[in-house]
Image (cartoon, rainbow, N blue to C red):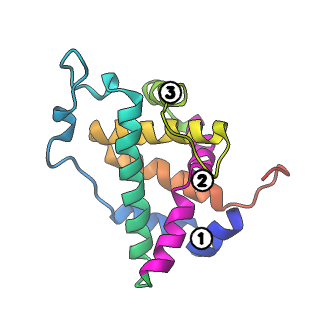
Amino acid sequence: MEEKINNILQSGGSEYGAELKEISLSDPYGIAELINDKNGNSDPKFVSPILLAYIGDSVYDLIIRTALVLKGNRQVAKLNKDAVLLVSARAQSKIADIILPMLNEDETGVYRRGVNSKPNTKSKNASFREYMKATGFEALVGYLYLSGKTGRITELVKTGIDGIKEPNTDGKE
């Protein structure tokens, strides 16, 4: 998988990071204010981890697809093939492993809530453990997005993608 990702990105971390830095996300429609828990609280800390993951999945997908488009004009089918690999549960699980030491206490709590959630779906191409770590990662991205911390999302995604691209030295895939 890492080899495929290297072939997709072929730019050495800093170049890819430049594309990620060009991406600016915001919450122009006040989505965070529209999502309330059962008590009417719109603080992202109190939003269901499944809802956070739902939003986070879309935000992460948008970041990856935008970064791939910014790398240059290519056929949509090729872009989609590359995007699918990078947004897979397996890739997100690996990113989660890489960024976990970088997370503060609140972020770690949101990630763990996502990992411990009870989704109604399962992955066809990843183990249950990988799928749950990916759900935790998506919940974290959703939380950060709704909190307006889009720069932090970009930082974590860039670090995770760069970490996936590095050769594995521990003998595991």
Q: Residue at x 47, y 63 (%)?
A: 17
- The kind of secondary structure the magenta stretch mainly shows is helix
Q: Which badge, 2 or 3, is on the more N-terminal residue?
A: 2
Residue 59, above or below 142 = below
Tag 1: amino acid: Gly
Q: Which badge, 1 or 3, is on the more N-terminal residue?
A: 1
For the record, the magenta segment spans 76-101
Q: Dot 2: few (<14), some (14–19), or many (≥20) neighbours within 10 Å? A: many
Tag 2: amino acid: Ala
Q: Residue at x 21, y 46 (%)?
A: 27
Local secondary structure at mark 2: helix
- Give left or right: position of 124 versus 169: left
Q: Residue at x 15, y 41 (%)?
A: 30
- Distance between mark 1 and mark 3 Cα atoms: 37 Å
**Closer to the camera, 41 or 128?**
128
Identify the residue under disc 1: 12
Local secondary structure at mark 3: loop
Rendering coords of residue 31 (x, y %)? 19, 40
Rendering coords of residue 128 (x, y %)? 64, 37
Magenta includes 116? no
Residue 91, above or below 52 = below
Q: Residue furthest left?
A: 29
Identify the residue under disc 2: 91
